[in-house]
Amino acid sequence: MPEFRQAAPKYVQMADHLRDRILRGDLRPGDDVPSERQLAADWGVSRPTATKALDVLRREGHLSGRRGAGTFVTYPPRVHRQASERYRRSIETGRIYPPGERARILDAGCVPAPAEIAQVLSLPEGVEVVRRRRLIVRGEEPVELSTSWLDGEIVHLAPRLVVTERILEGTLAYVEHMTGRRGRMARDRVSARLATPEERALLALPDPSAVAATQHVVYDAEDVPLEVTHAIGLPGAWTVEHEYPIGR
């Protein structure tokens, strides 16, 4: 049986658990979700508490349903999977992408560090770094273009970084396993801009198209940058949502 944390109300924790399963792809568009009665039994709570948990996800647009027909994951999903969901999936299943989603490695190798990447990784400009580019597809549809950058010094410990083959557990999990360095914290910076001609071609976008550009930096236990990833998401696929009290 899932265990409750102390801080958040029970219905919030239940909603968080189901949302994580949806964002990781464990529950896919069109899948049934447990009924209020089943959730109440599984979590050991009252039925109104289970109802409140499902209502949270309905308001967010993750669930829909009809009376007498059950509750389903909406299609298409509103929110693009973020790095945090992918990390949790890698830890729990050993694979970073859910069924139906995969990465095609476009190129992998060592290149001189661009000024921006050298600065973020705390390396001298021009030193060799790993550049690993991938196109992520869902079914046959391209949904994300991303490039990972790492210190070239770790290639002798993690040689698969410069091979154009998929790393099913994810780049970070592989680097952690091979080097012993553990990711402790990640910081994301999201902005919007126009797609470049290459990005439009790979993501099958018209000209012009706006995209969400995310810089994702992972830090190890010593607060040393371990990996930088630049991800380009489809227009309309990324949302950032916050819920907070405003009463006085």
Image (spheres, rainbow, N blue to C red):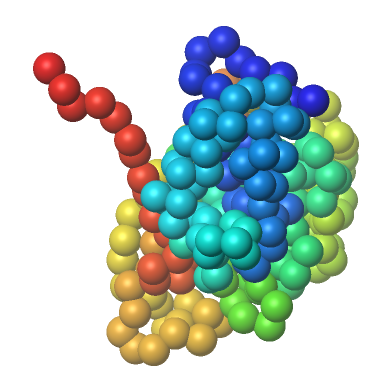
Instruction: Say left or right for 2 vs 165.
Output: left
For the question of whether residue 49 can be seen, the reply is: yes
Q: Nearer the viewer, residue 205 or 99?
A: 99
**Residue nearer the viewer, 224 or 119:** 224
Q: Nearer the viewer, residue 222 or 183?
A: 183
In the rendered image, the residue lying farthest to the top is: 6
Residue 125 visible in the snapshot? no
Q: Residue furthest left?
A: 248
Q: Residue 7: percent from the left, percent from the top?
A: 51, 13
Instruction: Please give the name of the residue rendered at 53% of the width and 29% of the height, measured from the top-left corner.
Output: 49
Residue 160 position, x and y percent, is 86, 54
Q: Classify 162 as above or below 157.
A: below
The quarter of the rendered structure image containing the N terminus is top right
Answer with left or right where residue 38 lies relative to residue 209. right
Corner quadrant of residue 209: bottom left
Q: What residue do we see at 31% from left, 84% from top? A: 208
Image quadrant where one finds the C terminus? top left
Residue at 36% over, 45% down: 241
The residue at 77%/44% (across/down) is 90
Q: Position of residue 34 (x, y in %)?
A: 69, 47
Expressed as whole percent of the image width and height from the top left, the position of residue 109 reads 73, 61
